[in-house]
Structures are given as C-alpha cells and as structure tokens.
Amino acid sequence: MKKYFLKTFGCQMNKSDSQRIAGFLEENNYRRTTTMEEADLIVVNMCSVRQSAVDRVFGLARKIDHCKKKNPKQQSILTGCILKQDKPKFKKMFDYLLNIKDLGSWGRYCLGKNNQRNKRDPKKDYFQLKPLSDSWPIAYVPISTGCNNFCSYCVVPYTRSEEVCRSAKDIIQEVEEAVKNNFKEIWLLGQNVNSYSASMKGDKKTKKISFPDLLKAIDKIPGDFWIRFTSSHPKNFSKELIRVMAHSKKITPYLHLAVQSGDNQILERMNRKYTIGQYKKIAREIKEEISNINLSTDIIVGFPGETKKQFENSIRLVEKTDFDMIYIARYSARPGTAAAKMDDDVPPEEKKRREKALNRVLEKRLKEKNKKYLNKIIPVLILKKDKDFLIAKSFDYKTVKVKAAAENIGNFINVKITKTDAWGLLGKIDQWKKQISHN
Ligand code: SF4
C-alpha cells in the first residue's frame, strides 16, 4: 500500500479541499503518513493570500527536494491557491501543479496507469468526491468555491476563478451524512456564502435557492448539531438571512462579517462596494434581531495610501461597534491584483504600529465585555485537547478552556465560567447534560 503526506496551508476552504484530497487518495489505496520521508506521494495544498504563506511553501519545497534525493520515486503535487506569477518557480520544484477542481482526474497523473480513478470523468464536479474528515466533531461543507468580487487586494478570484455554487441537494446530503456520523458542528463554506444561488427541483417545479433558503433546509435536518458559516460579504447581506438566523435553534449566534476598513475612501479603493454607514446598519439590524449575537470581522491595516486619519476611522469603528474578535492583517501586496499596482506607501513599521493600536482597543473592550460570562453557565462543544485542557467553543463562538477528561471531546456540555479575559474564557463542567434537542 502506498503512502501519502498531505500538508495544508490557509483557510477552512483549503482544509475542506484537503479532506476531499484525502478521501480521493484513500479510495485509491493510499494511506496517510505524517512522515514526509516515507511518503510515495506528497501533496501540498497552498494559500497565496499572504506572501508569508507562499514563502512557507517555498521552504517546504526545499525539504521535499531533499527527500526526493533520497527517494527518487517519490512524487509531489502542488495544489490550492497558486498565483500565476509563482507557477514557473513552483513547476521546477513540484512534479505536478494540479487544480483542485480537477481532483477527479488526478489519477491519470500520479496514481498509476491502471488506477480506477483514471476512468473518472475529469469534468465531474470535485464536490461530488467524498471527503475524509480529520476535523471531527467539526464538518466542513463547501457550498461554493471561487469569487466574482475582485476586492482589489485579494488573489482569490485569480487563484480560484469565478464563483461556482454547489447543488443544494448535494450540500443537504453531505450535511445529513455528517450528522449521521456524529459530527456536531457544521461549517458551511464559501468565499461569499451570501451570493449562493442554485436551482433545486421541487415536487412541481424547479426553484431558485438562496443562502437563507439553504440554511432553512439544513436547519430542518433532525439531530443535535450547530450550524455556522463563513465568509459573509456585507454587500450581499439580506434581512432574510437575519430573519432565518433569528428563528433557528441550530444556527449559532455568531457572525463573521469582514469590514476591512473603517474609512469609506479606503473601502472604495478596496472595491468592497459598501460604505461604513451601510455596514453599521447591518450590524445594528442584526443586533436588534439577535441580541446575543457575537460579531467578528477582518481589518487590513496599511492599505496603499491609508493615511493616519483614515486609519483613525478604523479605530473609531472598532470603538463604536461591538466586535467580539477582529482578525487584523498588515497589508501585503499580492502580485496580479489591482492593489499591487498602487503605491504600497505605508512603511512596515507603521503597519505594525497600526496593528498594535487596533489590538489594544480590541483587547480593552473584550476584557470588559467578556466579564458578562463570569459565573454564567453556557453550552459549549468540546473540540480538542491542548496540554492540560480541553478546548471548546461556546454556542456564540467564544473559546473556552475546560479541565476535563479527553473522552468528552465531541460532546455538548454545560460549563460554568470561572475566569474571563480578553481572548477567552475558563470554565468547569457544571453538569452533564446534552445540549437542548433540536428536533
Ligand atoms: S469577497 Fe473579496 S476578499 Fe473575499 S474572496 Fe472575494 S475577492 Fe477575496
């Protein structure tokens, strides 16, 4: 039996794609190894969103080269988000650069002539390949891939090309299967889930399915599980989505809604297609409908031309908006994007300063805000072990450390919060109790 080594960089979408790669390879009699040296096949699923991620792949490629010298039969594949500009260099370092969308036909390149996968129709949707999850109790279920938005700093429309939505029937089936297999947290994934649109055959006629429709259908699947989703673009955010979230017991009160900047001019240059006023309106409306919602966001600091005054607008936004987490990125130019043609004029030191300044505001707010959890009993899902603690996520997506036995992983339990700080909560098991039945 042949062995494969699989390394994944980047977002949940890449993790989800890697699970399909693993499923495909295992179906073809490969078994996973965590030792690169003993692998017959090395697959690297890369991310190009930041230069640092690309540099890590270059570093890994050097290690692969070293392994290959010892084992010349070893093959290597690079897939995922690869920039056109980087392809010539990577072509010299990997045996194959393959598109994840062609996963069904990878066999013809690397799995041997008589492999059954050679017979697969290469045009067949890669979403139809079965994933092999390594993330239980979390199931990542892609609903779309690619993006049509062309935010000026982002490589995704170039690396993943245009948005393709998966059939609602297939998505529902995959969720049903995950629930049957005891997965407790379902993440619906897409570069912009809010633009999801697909047709579905009904009893009488074919109807259009929007993202809120899809959520409603998944919400009806019997079983005890939570539903989360990402990413959500503010420009496509609908009141219907808020309504569906508010009326569901399974969709968790957590929303990641990337704002990217607190300044309208910067937003325009980022090609984000909404204003701060519109963003605040969505945040207000969702808080009115779902009072316990936790909101997180992304902010880029040091975008080309961002003045100190414009950055102060991001600070003001954070001071006035009730965010529960901000993923802050220092701008780095990505080749081929519209922003890469702009003058990257904010010095690295200043970007660092802005990142720290935002973090300080966030930390101060969260320190205060998280105090509301102290001595409260909240439902959490235990996800994994980390040293002496188990790591859990609350219904509203707070990280909770719990001291308990590892056999609790994958359970919904009630936890009494004994300590809080800006970045997380500490709790102890209050009582053994399964989470409210969702049926
Ligand atoms: S919405 Fe913008 S940031 Fe998100 S993947 Fe598409 S282009 Fe990139």
Image (spheres, helix red, strand yellow):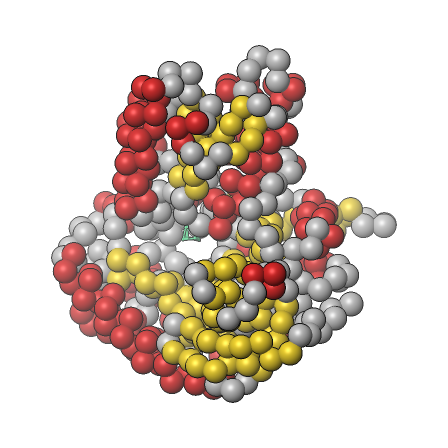
Residue 196 seen: no
Residue 37 seen: yes
| Up-down relation of residue 150 to residue 263 (above or below) | above
| Up-down relation of residue 30 to residue 232 (above or below) | above
Q: Residue at x 65, y 55 (%)?
A: 183
| Up-down relation of residue 211 to residue 72 (above or below) | below
Q: Residue at x 55, y 69 (%)?
A: 404
Q: Residue furthest right?
A: 204
Instruction: Give the image quarter of residue 292.
Output: bottom right
Q: Is residue 76 left or right of residue 173?
A: left
The residue nearer to you, when weighing 394 against 241, is 394
Q: Residue at x 51, y 81 (%)?
A: 417
Measured as percent of width and height from the top left, residue 381 is found at 59, 66
Position of the C terminus, as image quadrant, is: bottom right
Q: Residue at x 65, y 19 (%)?
A: 116
The residue nearer to you, when weighing 424 against 261, is 424
Q: How many marks?
A: 0
Measured as percent of width and height from the top left, residue 230 is found at 52, 58
Measured as percent of width and height from the top left, residue 8 is found at 43, 42
The residue nearer to you, when weighing 185 against 319, is 185
Q: Is residue 173 left or right of residue 106?
A: right
Measured as percent of width and height from the top left, residue 345 is found at 15, 55
Instruction: Give the image quarter of residue 85.
Output: top left
The residue nearer to you, when weighing 84 against 201, is 84
Instruction: Give the image quarter of residue 297.
Output: bottom left
Q: Is residue 48 left or right of residue 360?
A: right
Position of the N terminus, as image quadrant, is: top right
